[in-house]
Image (spheres, helix red, strand yellow):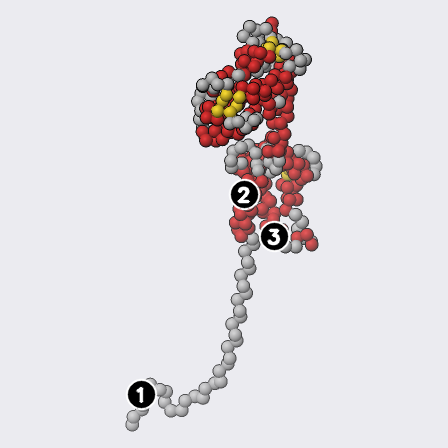
Amino acid sequence: MRTTILLCLLALPAFAQAQTTGQTPAQPTSPPPSQSAGPAAVPLPSWFVEIDTAKKGEVSRADFLKYRMKSFDELDGNKDSKVSLEEFLKLAEPPYSNDVPGGPSLEERRSRIRAAFQNLDLNASGFIERAEAEAPIQVEFNSYDTDRDNKITEPEIRAIMQRIAQRQAAERQQAEAERRKGLVALNELIDMQMRDADKLDKNNDGKISQQEYLVAAGPADGPQTQGQLPYDVRKKLVMIKFQEIDTNKDGIIDRAELAAYALKEFLETDTNKDRFLDQEEIKKFQEAEQNKTRDLIPKLMPAPAAPAQPRPAPQQQRAPQPAPSGPAPGLPQQTR
């Protein structure tokens, strides 16, 4: 049905507007209670309300065709029951289509209109003839006229619109699920934090003591510590993290503090502020945490012991010098 509507010439102004503005045509409000039929929560399409001016609750084939062909008649300036490509390209311009911020350019809109023209010009004559324009409209009407009585009634169109809405909702959910693959929402991050905390909460009291948290430092010795930092350094790193989470400094991490810390991490990691963490954001956050830890390690490592001072070599004993004969030097000589 979607393809039929897209190819319908007289639906093209609404189609082109939706393409260029990113918005769907405005839907009318629900009819008065006296006219409601079928699922009352489903609004009628705008074209049904505009055609059913007498409020009969039904649209005939002739009225539907006349309504849909209004655009054809507007584009057929010389009234030869044919629309040329030049005439058809007017659909890319006001009032049929307008420039909007972030929307397609005029040339992009013209490119789409050219493609639609090729689809409608079935005999490749270079014109869209009235019969070619009417054919997809007839097909569209048939898709709405489920009981084949040449009328589209409110119950029929409401049931169809309800199915369309349900299908679109399912498609949106599927698209969102695809988009969410690999993304982490805040509630999911908090759940992960809580599951990790439950593994540390050995006495199941809903809180984590310093002693319980120290398990995260790993074993003090044994083959598992091969290649790891010294146990004292790992303990200090773990306790620094404990102090970050334990905001009230009571020596206990409770679930409220865990949730608050998860929120803090989430806001720091969600750099594009789309309320989800993608793999690139998580990677950057982890790298930043690793850099902080790397900067901390030298400050936490034990100071190296001072090297032992070498002992001075023992002094050798000098041999005694013989006493000098004669007078001591520097003293005056005796005279007679």
Farthest residue in the bottom direction?
Answer: 336
Of the 4 image quadrants, the one containing the C terminus is: bottom left
Between 207 and 285, the one lying in front of the other is 285
Question: Which residue matches tag 1?
Answer: 332
What residue did someone put label 3 on? 229
Residue 214: percent from left, percent from top: 64, 44
Q: Residue 143's spot in the image, x, y percent? A: 64, 18
Relative vertical location of residue 104 with respect to residue 56 in this rendering, above or below: below
Q: CA distance from mark 2 to mark 3?
A: 24 Å
Callout 1, which amino acid? Pro
Q: Is residue 136 above or below residue 29?
A: below
Residue 28 visible from this viewpoint:
no
* Disc on res. 284: 2
Q: What amino acid is labelled 2 in the image?
A: Lys
Left or right for 14, reference 190: left
For the residues bearing labels 2 and 3, Cβ distance under 8 angstroms: no
Work out how far the residue at label 1 is from the one at label 3, CA to CA, in angstroms: 80 Å
Nearer to us in this view, 14 or 311:
14
Count neighbours of disc 2 (C-alpha within 10 A) and say few if under 14, some if 14 to 19, many if 20 or more: few
Pick the quarter of the image with the N terminus: top right
Can you say whether 310 is above or below 255 in the image?
Answer: below
Quick one: SS at disc 1?
A: loop
Q: Which element type, helix, strand or loop, lies under badge 2?
A: helix
Residue kind at label 3, given as amino acid type: Leu
